[in-house]
Image (spheres, rainbow, N blue to C red):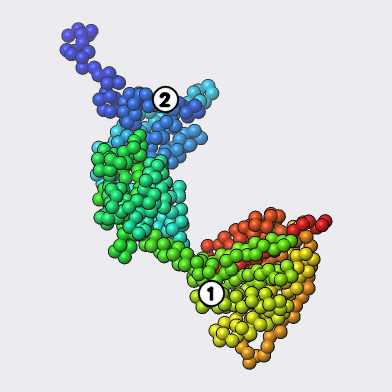
Amino acid sequence: MSRDTAPPGGAAARVEQAEALAANGIGCFEWEPASGRFTLDDNGLAVFDLLPEEYNGQADDLGQRIPEDESARLTALVADIVAGRADSYSTYFRIRLRGGGTRWTHTQGQVVRHPAYGAVRVVGVLRDATQELSHSALRLLAESDRRRQEDAMREVAHALAEAMSVADVVDVLTGDQSMRRLGTQGVSLGVVEQGRIRLVAAVGTTNAQVKELQRARLAEPWPLNDAVRSGEPLFFTSLETFIDRYPRLARYVAGTRATAAAFLPLIAQGRAIGAMSMVYEGKRSFSAEDRTLLTAWSSAIAQSLQRAMLLDRSREIATGLQNVMLPRRIPDVPGGRIAVRYRTAREGIWIGGDWYDAVLLADRSVGLAIGDVQGHDTEAAAIMGQLRIAMTAYAREGHPCESVLAKASAFLAEMDAERFATCLYVHVAPATGTVRAANAGHLPPLVRHADGTVTWWEVAGGPPLGLPVEWGAAVYPHSRFRLRPGDTLVLYSDGLVERPGEDLDQGLARLAAVLSAGPADLDALADHLRDSLTERIDAEDDAALLMLQLDGSPDA
């Protein structure tokens, strides 16, 4: 055989390098970290499940296919290359497919540095490695995902355990952090009320559009209603199937990116008290583990929601009872304005004995009273109402402030309720600014002047109201003060200043500072005090505020 004679079929047997790579599903890439340019051949695009028109050649565009946890690990590899700590790498990572699933991918790269000016370029290959990895690895991944989902639901459930109202439950479930943890793009929540389901939350493009569900009858064919009536969760992974079952919702979901939804009944003590929906983008199926986990999680939500509904109802009853006991109307004062604020306790029993009243007297002066009956129960509230009415009657009869308190103390003692009460009674003549005040164990008043400075008034006083008759008649000396035009007199109960474990002086100093920094307008100032000093969700005491502001300016 001559030296230049080729073996039979030699040319045909040669396989091009590109063909070999394609035959094995291996893609090639070239990456420039400085510019972010990341060039992929057709095989590389196929590995990333990208069409040529979906990719513009930048590394950032690949982020849509890489889960966040995988992206963080790859970012660390990139940092090592850019910093010169590594010249090559080889790693496995997952890619998110357009259908919602994932595939394992292997990539290997080599750094090429320009000999003259050190510019970095990375060339490498990547391939589908799903079949290469064992079934146990995929199973471990699924278990890891499930543990991550369980942890996310546990964190949300922990936040729900601290919810004190339905509004708090809504805030937890619809917060960005909770939705991100749970991987959902839309949440809605409805509660059952008198044969209807009332929508209390709807977050997400699709959910927020369904206005017809704001208060729908349970008999109507809506998914939340069906979940409540059947007591069983509903799972959808096909938009067509969802529209076939609920054609009236077709116009709301048209053009949506939602790929799956779960509608969960919220069952507490064997009764459906509401339902919630979770809408997903990219999810294509609900595994048996998913369904079990969501069903169990909905039970925890139901317990939190039921507790919050009971707390809301208790708070509503307490507020209603308290409002009945407090004056229905505050009189108009010639030469001044009055503002009042009241807040029930937010923990424990919300019914308390704090009260206030203002009565316009025959000489166009005004009597102001604020007090606190011992205890936090319905009896305290009832005694408070009777005591307030009695004091109003004594004031209208024209008795001086020291006599009003003495008579009120005797009245409370004769009730034999074994309760005492603190009270501060102030008689103000707006025309002259003259003030007479008597105190029965209550906190001292303070005055905010027109320039924002604050003055405390030390009022002479006696013991709390209602002490036993055998102790002798209580005496309540009075003190005299003067208000200038534009001054604001502030009376308050201890719930506005006291905090557990804190010295009372700290609370009083805080009140003075907040009052001094507040706006000049009376109503705005009252709101400022209430919002600044009663914002704590763990407040165990109710709080009352009564303010009188004289007309005019200091120059008047």
Q: Position of residue 298 (x, y in %)?
A: 33, 56
Q: Closer to the N terminus: mark 2 or mark 1?
A: 2
Position of residue 15 measured from the top left corner of the image (x, y, whole percent): 25, 19
| Residue 90 in sight here | no
Q: Is residue 521 above or below residue 119?
A: below
Q: Residue furthest front?
A: 362
Foreground residue, 434 or 533? Answer: 434
Question: Mark 2, mark 1: which one is toward the viewer?
Answer: 1
Above or below, 348 against 207 in this view is below
- Give the residue type that dot 1 points to: Ala
Q: Which residue is mark 2?
A: 56
Q: Front-most of 383 and 366?
A: 366
Q: Position of residue 263 (x, y in %)?
A: 31, 50
Q: Please say whether residue 396 is visible from this viewpoint.
A: yes
Give yes or no for contact between labels 2 and 1 (Cβ–Cβ under 8 Å): no
Image quarter hosting the C terminus: bottom right
Q: Is residue 401 left or right of residue 151?
A: right
Q: Kindly identify which numbered label has been placed on residue 381.
A: 1
Q: Nearer the viewer, residue 497 or 353?
A: 353
- Name the residue at 17% across, 9% down: 1
- Tell me the residue at 30%/21% (across/down): 18
Instruction: Count residues near mark 2 (Cα–Cα under 10 Å), then give few for <14, some for 14-19, many for 20+.
Output: some
Q: Is residue 286 left or right of residue 526?
A: left
Residue at left offset 66%, top offset 72% = 369
Disc 2 from disc 1: Cα separation: 71 Å
Q: Secondary structure at mark 2?
A: loop
* Above-or-below relation of 444 to 170: below
Q: Which x, y percent locates residue 473?
A: 68, 88
> In which quarter of the view is residue 403 placed?
bottom right
Identify residue type, mark 2: Asn
Q: Which mark is residue 352?
A: none
* Secondary element type, mark 1: helix
